[in-house]
Image (tube, rainbow, N blue to C red):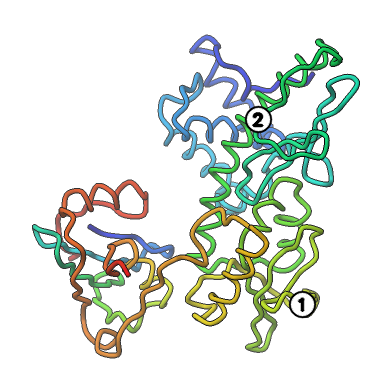
Amino acid sequence: MPFRPSRVTSTPAIKAPMILSVLEKIGSDAAIMELATIAARAASGRTSVYYASASQGEAQLARIALGKGWTIDELDERVTPTLGMDAEGGLTLSYGTRSVRVGFDETLSPYFRVDGERVRALPVKRKTDDAAKVKEAKKIWDELKEDVGVIADRRIRAMERAMVTGRRWDVPTFRATWLDHPLMVHLARGVVWLCGDATSSVWAFRVAEDRSFSDENDAMFDLSRATWVEVAHPLRLREERVAKLTRMFSDYELIQPFPQLAREAPQLTDAEASAQEISRPRTPGGAQQLSAALLQTGRWRQERSRPK
Amino acid sequence: MQRIFPDEQTYAEAIFDDASTSVNVKFWRGTEQLSPGRIEPIMVAEVLRDCEIVQPG
C-alpha cells in the first residue's frame, strides 16, 4: 500500500514540516494531491499534525499554484483525488457472498445499494457474510467517507465561487474537470450550466445521469456548438428559465450542492444604478451579529477606515 | 465592512446602522467611488444578498 501522508494522524512534530517540504519539492500531481488533502483536513477543523493553523496549508498551496502559474482553484481541479472510484463514479465493497455498491448524490453525500435497495448506512454483517471481508470493507468505507467529506466541502465552495465570479472553462477542460472525474460528475449533475459560443448565443443545460446533456425543456442538448461553459448564476438565467429549471430539478429529485436556482438575486432599480450608493432597509437583526456572519463567509473583512 | 471582489481592486463597503434596520452600500475601485450601475450585476446581487437587504417574501 502506498504511503499516504494525509492518513498519518500522529508523527513527531519535527518530521511533519519535513514531509510537507518533501511533498512540495516533488511537485507531482500525486504529491500536491496529498498536500491538498492535508490542507483541506486542517481547514475543515480537524486537528492536524502538519499545520498549526488552517491558513498555513492554504498558504503553501497558494505558493505552489503561483509557481506553476495556476490559480488555487485550477490547482485543486488538477489534483482532486478520485479515491479509487470506478468509471461509474462509485465503488463496490465485497462482503464475500454479496457486495455493497457505494454511490453518491449530487451533493456528494454517499448512499449504498444493497439487494436493489438504496440505504444511507453501511449494511450490518449477516451470518452468511465473510467476516474478514466485511471488516476490510468497513475500513475502506471509514477512510473514504472522511476523504469525500473533505473534498466535497472544498469543491462545492469552489463551484459556488466560480458561479459568483463568472469563471469559464473551455469545453475540453469542462469535460475533464466535471464530467470525466468520477467524483466531480456527481456535483456537475446538481447544477445548471450555461454555455455559449463566440457569438452572443447562450444556452442553459444540465448533466443527466448518463452524462448526456439536457436543455431547459429537457430535450437532448449538443454541447459541441459551445466554446465555453460556466456555472449559471440565476441572474443570467432570468426568472422564467429559473422557474422552469426549478420544476425540472424537483421532478428529478435533484438536490443542489449549494443555493443556485433558489438563490436570491436582487437587482438595482434605475435610480440606484445611477446613484453613488445604495441605501436599503433590511430586516432588523443587530449590526454586530450581521457583521460576524459576514466575516464568517470569508468574503468580507472588517475595515474601520474609509479608503484614501 | 468591506467585501473584496475577485480583481482585488474593486470592492464594496457596507455600513449598517446600529439597529441594523438599514444598510448603505458603496462601491470603490482603488480610491475612486463607482456608481453601482458600473459594477458587474452579479457582483452587486451577491453583495446585496450577503447584506440580507432583500426582505423575506
What residue is shown at x 75% (from left), y 57% (from top)? A179
Which residue is pictured at 24% across the width and 65% down the height?
B13
Amino acid under disc 2? Ala
A300 is higher (above) or lower (below) than B47: above
- Judging depth in this view, the residue of A215 and A41 nearest the camera is A215
Q: Position of residue B12 (x, y in %)?
A: 29, 67
Quadrant housing the C terminus of chain A: bottom left
Three-letter amino acid code at disc 1? Answer: Ala
Query: Which percent across, then down, holds residue A182?
Result: 76, 46
Is B39 rendered above or below residue A199?
A: above
Q: Quadrant of residue A118?
A: top right
Q: Which residue is mark 2?
A: A121
Mark 2 crowd level (few <14, some 14–19, many ≥20, 10 Å Cα): few
Measured as percent of width and height from the top left, residue A233 is found at: 51, 70
- Which sits in the foreground, A190 or A169? A190
- Mark 2 or 1 closer to N-term? 2
Q: Does A159 sit above or below residue A126?
A: below
Relative to B19, A266 lies left or right: right
Label 1: element kind? loop
Mark 1 neighbour density, 10 Å: few (under 14) some (14–19) many (20 or more) = few
Helix, strand or loop under label 2? loop
Marks 2, 1 in one chain:
yes
For this orientation, the residue located farthest to the left is B18
In x, y percent, where is residue A203?
Answer: 66, 80
